[in-house]
Amino acid sequence: MKKIWRNEEGVSPVIAVILMVAITVVLAAVLYVMVSGMMTTTGSTPTVSMSWTENPDAPGNYTGNVVSISGATSVKLKDVSCTATHAGSSGEDTLNDLKGTAKITLGTFSLDFNDVNGDDKLGAQDTFTIVGGTSGDTIRLVYSPTGGQMGQSTLT
């Protein structure tokens, strides 16, 4: 004959609550690890110091030299945007796009960038050239990963 086993015992309510809390904690920990991996910090904004000299033989033509960079061992040109403001107008581009033949042009004003050693990184030897500049024109460098200003110069 067939014997029917009836076991009406289950997990006690206390054990059930402990299991539910444990599962919730584990799921929260897994979710935290996944999300924290996506939220990496980009660090601080490097600081750039530049010096500008006007060509005495060609007024309005300036050469800007990168004097120093602090706060980073290496700054890629694609991570730096340059904004030039002249006579109330402004233009912006990345340094990576400005090297070579590209320029920021605002009427008779133009600014270009020269990556002297061609390593696609901003360095103390790199230069900016302005043609048609006037006193009060500003050049501003912004570090894209943080959105922070690296440096700003005003022509005198």
Image: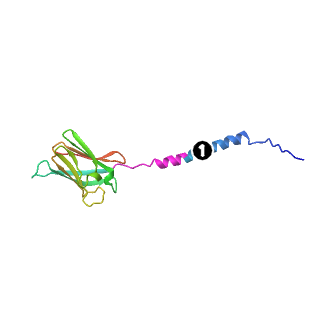
Horizontal side, residue 3 vs residue 28: left or right? right
Horizontal side, residue 68 vs residue 145: left or right? left
Residue 110 in picture, x, y percent from top left: 19, 48
In this view, the residue farthest toward the front is: 1
Amino acid under disc 1? Val
Horizontal side, residue 23 vs residue 50: left or right? right
In this view, the residue farthest toward the left is: 57
Q: Please tell me which residue is depicted at 27% across the width and 60% down the height of the picture.
A: 118
| Colour convention of the picture | rainbow
Tell me, yes or no, whether the highlighted magenta stretch contains residue 41: yes
Which structural element holds mark 1? helix
Which residue is identified by label 1?
25
Tell me, yes or no, whether the highlighted magenta stretch contains residue 104: no
Foreground residue, 72 or 138? 138
The number of callouts visible is: 1
Q: Please tell me which residue is depicted at 33% across the width and 51% down the height of the picture.
A: 79
In this view, the residue farthest toward the right is: 1
Foreground residue, 149 or 31? 31
In the image, the segment drawn in magenta is 31-45
Query: How many residues crowd around disc 1 within 10 Å: few (fewer than 14), some, or many (20 or more)?
Result: few
Q: Quadrant of the C terminus?
A: top left
Residue 122 in picture, x, y percent from top left: 29, 55
Residue 34 in picture, x, y percent from top left: 52, 48
Residue 84 in picture, x, y percent from top left: 23, 45
